[in-house]
Image (tube, rainbow, N blue to C red):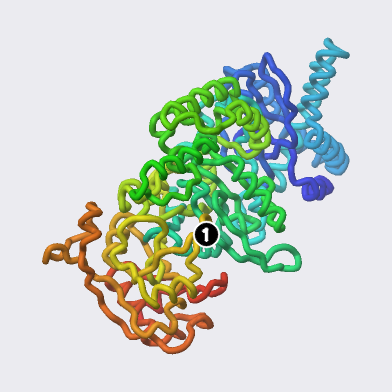
């Protein structure tokens, strides 16, 4: 069909929000409305100003409009869509007129999607030129639009919507029918019916990658590998204090390129994966755009596949100033933060004085709250140098640039789940930096464990299936705080240099020590890992004697678990099990059986001690240097 060819070239075209019909809205035209109006085949309501944007490849069931909103519009269009249009379509095909009808509808479709034809034409005809005949002409045009949508749905797209073949998986970037983009300060939907209903059969769709130690375990590489099979990669906590470095081939020439991710989901390296920043993340907008611009300059295109929850809190430059002032105030007891303003931003959130993304779209309110927030920091820390009015002006511009990225996060993620999209959650930091379960107060300011996934994305626990804990073959940490297995000898220098133990975000040299299985068992209990990714095992190549911590002794007694009291933790005597090192390099190994026997003994002891299978083993820095250990391998 010629129409299908046109659709193939155009990709985005108009959408009906009735039943299962998901036909993409092209470019909605912003206009002030005083009554409900059909724009692009959708009902737009003046009190909400929201609309649904879609593509032909999506099949989520959006609810029907509430008939109480402009009931005569709704009733007439619904009548056309469910009764008259099918009869007309059947009659045209039966009498051999499908070619002519196809051509006419194709033209209407293209006009509709590229210039918002219905909206512009209707407004011009009804209000300016033909106030009497205009409505009739407008309804004829709407009829053609509905005929187009119904014909497409009934003939071709109903099949493709339900396809799960690999060919259709390639079209994952064309998912914007689920993305509720807010082009208006009022970001609420017309009715609560727009939210998907909970579906108890939709369980275990979300895979989660979490750091199990003090961070820097190498979560980015596993996330990159898994994201190749995922539709969505989401961040749920933290901010641009996180850091992942990924090397990937980019462009038609497959140029090997290094990417540093701090705030954006690293799954964006996969060009078919959509990135989502959830409400649990604190967003520094200048860093957001700086990172995005850097990725795109390196050839990684992120158009229409990066979205931010409207409930995410904002990090401002004054938060970063305050972060540094707090460290100075603490003196010798400083925590060693990244000074990215993350802690002060979460403090604003907890004190209910913070500003969220949606506040940007009621700018007078935003400006008033911002001034009050800065004034409060002046009272607390003194009048440090800060241009409040200049910052407000800057955020007015940022608000417009950010607008296309903003979505209702809850509706977004649950629409994904309702349509069987595969979601990967990329954890930031790690459990031992968790605000509740980490080595408090030497922690970050967010929930970095499995609980933060639910609260940071707005999803229930039963949605979570696989939980992969990433653990380094030794231990490292940045910043201050007790570190029971820390080394201060030649082995530490080996780990730092061979393991490139320098922070992606801060550039600081990391403290290094032996693997601590007491801490790891504590981490496993809290996060409930279904499997582990053991990383940087190759860094232990050439180490003649390798140790792992198996228990803590305090005042002559073995502790039952990892202690909350840091004074106690600083005084524990660590009990180790010692392993002989292995000869040669393991970096060329592609199967578990290819690892030296002494190396396998080390891996299997860790697995047996923790009671969690090790499914992934990192044997080098490259993306391909990852052994995927099959179940059969573990049973041998």
One can see residue 51 in this view: no
Location of the C terminus (image quadrant): bottom left
The residue drawn where x is 81% and y is 29% is: 117
The residue drawn where x is 69% and y is 42% is: 153
Residue 68 position by quadrant: top right
Seen as rendered, the residue at the extreme bottom is: 583
> Along the horizontal axis of the image, is 620 left or right of 29?
left
Q: Estimate the x, y position of residue 572 in percent, counting from the top left.
A: 21, 63
Residue 576 position by quadrant: bottom left
Considering depth in this image, is 289 or 164 the residue closer to the camera? 289
List the residue tagged with mark 1.
Answer: 507
Mark 1 crowdedness (10 Å alpha carbons): few <14, some 14-19, many ≥20: few
Q: Estimate the x, y position of residue 384 in percent, counting from the top left.
A: 51, 33
Seen as rendered, the residue at the extreme top is: 132
* 481 versus 328 height, above or below: below
The residue drawn where x is 75% and y is 65% is: 252
* 251 versus 324 height, above or below: below
Q: Estimate the x, y position of residue 611 in percent, counting from the top left.
A: 29, 68
Count of numbered marks? 1
Considering depth in this image, is 297 or 413 the residue closer to the camera? 297
Considering depth in this image, is 234 or 158 the residue closer to the camera? 234
Secondary structure state at the residue bearing disc 1: loop
The residue drawn where x is 62% and y is 58% is: 269
Q: Estimate the x, y position of residue 204 in percent, counting from the top left.
A: 42, 53
* 568 versus 47 height, above or below: below
One can see residue 332 in this view: yes
Considering depth in this image, is 570 or 454 the residue closer to the camera? 570
> Along the horizontal axis of the image, is 213 left or right of 225?
left
* 625 versus 148 height, above or below: below
């Amino acid at each position: 069909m010629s129409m299908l060819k046109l659709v193939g070239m155009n990709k985005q075209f108009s959408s009906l929000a009735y039943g299962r019909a998901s036909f993409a809205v092209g470019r909605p035209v912003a206009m002030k409305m005083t009554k409900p109006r059909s724009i692009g085949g959708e009902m737009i309501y003046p009190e909400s100003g929201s609309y649904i944007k879609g593509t032909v490849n999506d099949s989520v069931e959006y609810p029907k409009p509430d008939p109480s909103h402009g009931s005569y519009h709704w009733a007439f269009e619904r009548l056309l869509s469910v009764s008259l249009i099918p009869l007309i379509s059947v009659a045209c095909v039966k009498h051999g007129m499908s070619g002519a009808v196809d051509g006419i509808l194709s033209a209407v479709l293209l006009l509709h999607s590229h210039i918002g034809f219905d909206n512009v034409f209707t407004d011009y005809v009804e209000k300016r030129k033909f106030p009497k005949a205009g409505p009739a002409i407008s309804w004829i045009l709407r009829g053609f639009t509905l005929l187009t949508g119904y014909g497409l749905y009934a003939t071709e797209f109903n099949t493709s919507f339900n396809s799960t073949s690999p060919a259709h998986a390639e079209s994952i970037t064309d998912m914007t029918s689920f993305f509720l983009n807010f082009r208006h300060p009022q970001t609420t939907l017309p009715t609560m019916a727009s939210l998907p209903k909970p579906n108890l059969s939709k369980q275990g769709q979300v895979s989660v990658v979490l750091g199990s130690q003090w961070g820097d375990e190498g979560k980015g590489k596993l996330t990159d590998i898994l994201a190749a099979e995922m539709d969505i990669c989401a961040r749920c906590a933290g901010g641009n204090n996180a850091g992942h470095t990924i090397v990937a081939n980019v462009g038609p020439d497959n140029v090997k390129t290094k990417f540093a991710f701090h705030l954006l989901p690293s799954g964006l390296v996969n060009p078919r994966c959509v990135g989502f920043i959830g409400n649990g993340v604190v967003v520094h907008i200048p860093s957001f755009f700086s990172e995005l611009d850097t990725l795109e300059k390196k050839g990684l295109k992120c158009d229409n596949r990066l979205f931010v929850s409207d409930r995410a809190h904002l990090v401002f430059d004054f938060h970063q100033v305050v972060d540094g002032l707090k460290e100075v105030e603490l003196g010798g007891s400083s925590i060693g933060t990244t000074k990215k303003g993350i802690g002060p931003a979460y403090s604003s959130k907890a004190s209910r004085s913070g500003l969220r993304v949606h506040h940007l779209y009621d700018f007078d309110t935003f400006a008033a709250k911002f001034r009050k927030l800065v004034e409060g920091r002046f009272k607390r820390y003194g009048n440090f140098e800060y241009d409040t009015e200049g910052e407000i002006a800057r955020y007015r511009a940022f608000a417009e640039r950010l607008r296309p990225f903003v979505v209702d996060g809850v509706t977004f993620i649950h629409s994904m789940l309702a349509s069987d999209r595969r979601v990967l959650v990329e954890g930031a930091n790690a459990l031992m930096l968790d605000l509740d379960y980490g080595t408090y107060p030497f922690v970050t300011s967010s929930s970095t464990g499995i609980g933060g996934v639910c609260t940071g994305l707005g999803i229930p626990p039963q949605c979570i299936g696989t939980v992969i804990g990433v653990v380094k073959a030794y231990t490292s940490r940045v910043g201050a705080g007790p570190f029971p297995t820390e080394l201060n000898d030649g082995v530490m220098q080996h780990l730092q240099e061979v393991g490139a133990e320098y922070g992606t975000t801060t550039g600081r040299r990391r403290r290094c020590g032996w693997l601590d299985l007491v801490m790891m068992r504590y981490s496993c209990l809290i996060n409930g890992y279904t499997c582990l990714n053991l990383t940087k095992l190759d860094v232990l190549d050439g180490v003649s004697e390798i140790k792992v911590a198996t228990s803590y002794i305090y005042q002559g007694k073995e502790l039952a678990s990892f202690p909350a009291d840091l004074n106690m933790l600083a005084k524990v005597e660590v009990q180790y099990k010692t392993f002989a090192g292995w000869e040669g390099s393991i970096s060329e190994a592609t199967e578990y059986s290819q690892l030296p026997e002494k190396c396998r003994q080390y891996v299997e002891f860790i697995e047996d001690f923790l009671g969690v299978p090790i499914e992934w083993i990192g044997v080098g820095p490259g993306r391909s240097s990852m052994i995927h250990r099959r179940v059969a391998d573990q049973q041998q």
